[in-house]
Amino acid sequence: MREYRTRLISDVVTGQVDVRGIEVPEVAEDELLALEEDTAESDDVIDDEGDMDETD
């Protein structure tokens, strides 16, 4: 999943994917906080397991 995210960001930055017409929907602040907590927890799991091999 991390590789997909990195690739998508790279494609947008280099202009290979056009995102000018995309509208971001309204998101409730509670939902954003929940997502941040989930992300922090998954980062802790990765840190606990040691360095992940990025070439997989």
Image: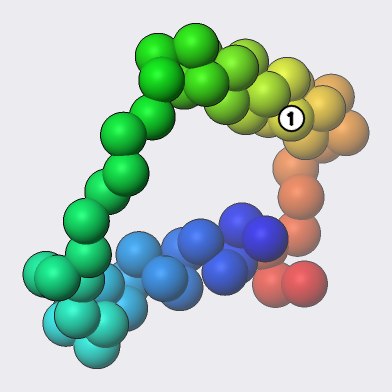
- Which residue is the extreme one toward the bottom? 16
Name the spot of residue 5 as percent of width and height, x first. 51, 61
Q: Residue at x 22, y 56 (%)?
A: 23
Q: Nearer the viewer, residue 55 or 21?
A: 21
Q: Nearer the viewer, residue 46 or 29?
A: 29
Q: Is residue 46 left or right of residue 1?
A: right
Q: Residue at x 77, y 72 (%)?
A: 56
- Which residue is the extreme one toward the left? 20
Q: Is residue 47 visible?
A: no
Q: Is residue 15 left or right of residue 37?
A: left
Residue type for callout 1: Ser
Q: Residue at x 26, y 82 (%)?
A: 17
Up the image or down, 32 lies above or below 20; here it is above
- Which residue is the extreme one toward the right? 49
Name the spot of residue 49 as percent of width and height, x first. 88, 33
Q: Quadrant of residue 41?
A: top right
Q: Nearer the viewer, residue 52 or 32?
A: 32
Up the image or down, 15 lies above or below 5; here it is below
- The residue identified by callout 1 is 42
Q: Secondary structure at mark 1?
A: helix
Q: Is residue 51 left or right of residue 19?
A: right
Name the spot of residue 10 as percent of width and height, x first. 32, 71
Q: Is residue 47 left or right of residue 30?
A: right
Q: Residue at x 67, y 60 (%)?
A: 1
